[in-house]
């Protein structure tokens, strides 16, 4: 059976509903910095970077995703 995802390092503070740190899963490691109630942009990354995926809360996720798409086409 494949290993399920688990947290490697990170923290959540009750006074600031945010989770940040690493998530380990069978395909590699993800870096997350997500806040409750805030949209999230998820970016799949390619080797040789150390993370498989990046998930970050941003106020305007659609604008951020579009900016990343434009950047990646260059």
Image (spheres, rainbow, N blue to C red):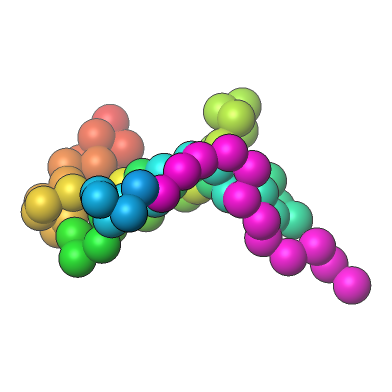
Question: Which of 61 and 31 lies nearest the eye of the viewer?
Answer: 31
Q: Can you name the residue that lies furthest to the front here?
A: 15
Coordinates of residue 63 in the picture (x, y in percent): 10, 51
Question: Which of 65 and 3 lies nearest the eye of the viewer?
Answer: 3
Coordinates of residue 72 in the picture (x, y in percent): 31, 37
Q: Quadrant of residue 25?
A: bottom right
Is 11 covered by the magenta stretch?
A: yes
Q: Residue at x 24, y 35 (%)?
A: 71
Q: Residue at x 11, y 52 (%)?
A: 59
Q: Which residues are magenta?
A: 1-12
Q: Please state if 34 lies on the left or on the right of 4 as rendered.
A: left
Q: Is residue 18 above or below residue 73?
A: below
Which quadrant would the N terminus be assigned to in this image? bottom right
Q: Can you name the residue that lies furthest to the right here?
A: 1
Q: Is residue 31 above or below residue 17?
A: above
Question: Which of 34 and 68 lies nearest the eye of the viewer?
Answer: 34
Q: Is residue 51 above or below residue 35?
A: above
Q: Residue at x 67, y 60 (%)?
A: 5
Is 68 covered by the magenta stretch?
A: no
Coordinates of residue 44 in the picture (x, y in percent): 47, 49
């Amino acid at each position: 059976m494949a290993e399920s995802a688990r947290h490697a390092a990170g923290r959540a503070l009750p006074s600031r509903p945010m989770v940040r740190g690493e998530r380990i899963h069978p395909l590699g490691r993800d870096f997350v910095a997500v806040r409750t109630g805030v949209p999230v942009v998820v970016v799949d990354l390619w080797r040789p970077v150390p993370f498989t995926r990046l998930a970050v809360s941003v106020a305007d996720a659609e604008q951020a995703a579009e900016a990343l798409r434009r950047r990646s086409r260059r």
